Image (cartoon, grey):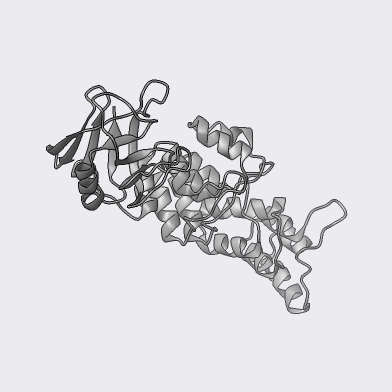
Amino acid sequence: MAAAAHGNIDIFGLLLARTTNLHAEGRTNDGRDLLGMALDGGNPGIVETVLERLPPMQQWTTSTRRALGAALLGGDKEQIRLLLRKHSMPPTPEGRNVPFLAYSIAGSNSSLFRTLLACGADPNTVLPSRCDKDFLALLSSNSLRSYVEEDRNLTVVMLAAGLGQDDYLRALLDAGANRNRLTSRDRMSALDIAAETGHWRAAQILLGGGPPPDQLRLEISLALQRVALVKNGVPVYRTQCSTGRPGYSTKRGEFVITNKERYHRSTIYHVDMPYFMRLSCLDFGMHAGYVADHPASHGCIRLPEDAARKFFSEIPVGTVVTVQ
């Protein structure tokens, strides 16, 4: 340990040649370990040797966090990979519960995010049950913050989706992240969270695609009770519709068609809803039904049957629908 602390690679090498057990995990009476002393000594060769001899461990120590910080600062990807492989738990900042990978997404730290992911950070990293206050302060969406605080087993994929961090989301999926995992309490997927927080681009990514809205979209006017199919910026088809009556107002905003059912029956109102196209995983959508000359539904967008059939057959899942 003295050789490591003084950074004396020659003496350290001689001692290493005479022992079969480096006792890299051992500690001195004052609580210091060999890695910490090697870091204090400042000799990269000794630090690397100690790291290689470390046994697999679950939790990160002060010394392994120091080593990770130094490797990140110096851009030493091999050492970062080695440290990540040695630990079964993801690294967190000292005194924090939330992993570095989640902080990098919430804080838009692209350099840290891409370095960790390239070096083997788990793309399915789970947020802790109790997140740090400074991390929660980075979450701009109240609904996302509510899920993070109250639900369990949210992953960094869900975090990226809920923040609308599209590039981070793609990178996580490319690295093998599971887009279909569900939270424990509310059984929410990353797609549900993207839709709930209004990030239609993230929803399209999780759906596997969708047309750009400047090429294809639907526009619904609540005031006019009309729907327009818009292609390349030009309305090519219009139809009447009937939206939510007073007390059941149709939600406004930008949505994505997240699934379609030719034969759908409402579990709430026990009525058939042919050619059903659900909007953003929510409890409403577009379907064939009686179209009055005024708002008359329980929140869905009722369409004439020929229009519903046309939209159902021609408009793919992932298409953006604007309700205004």
Residue 292 in the image: state x and y as whole percent.
26, 28
Which quarter of the picture shows residue 287? top left
Instruction: Between residue 207 and residue 1, name the one nearer to us.
Output: 207
Residue occupying image coordinates x 76% and y 71%: 22
Residue 181 in the image: state x and y as whole percent.
53, 55
Residue occupying image coordinates x 85% and y 51%: 30
Residue occupying image coordinates x 78% and y 62%: 1
Left or right: 6 as drawn, with respect to 261: right
Q: Quadrant of the C terminus?
A: top left
Instruction: Between residue 88 and residue 24, name the one nearer to us.
Output: 88
> Is the residue 300 above or below the residue 305 in the image?
above
Residue occupying image coordinates x 59% and y 33%: 134
Residue 286 in the image: state x and y as whole percent.
31, 40
Residue 108 visible, this orientation: no
Left or right: 31 as drawn, with respect to 148: right
Left or right: 261 as drawn, with respect to 294: right
> Is the residue 125 above or below the residue 321 in the image?
below
Residue 213 in the image: state x and y as whole percent.
23, 41
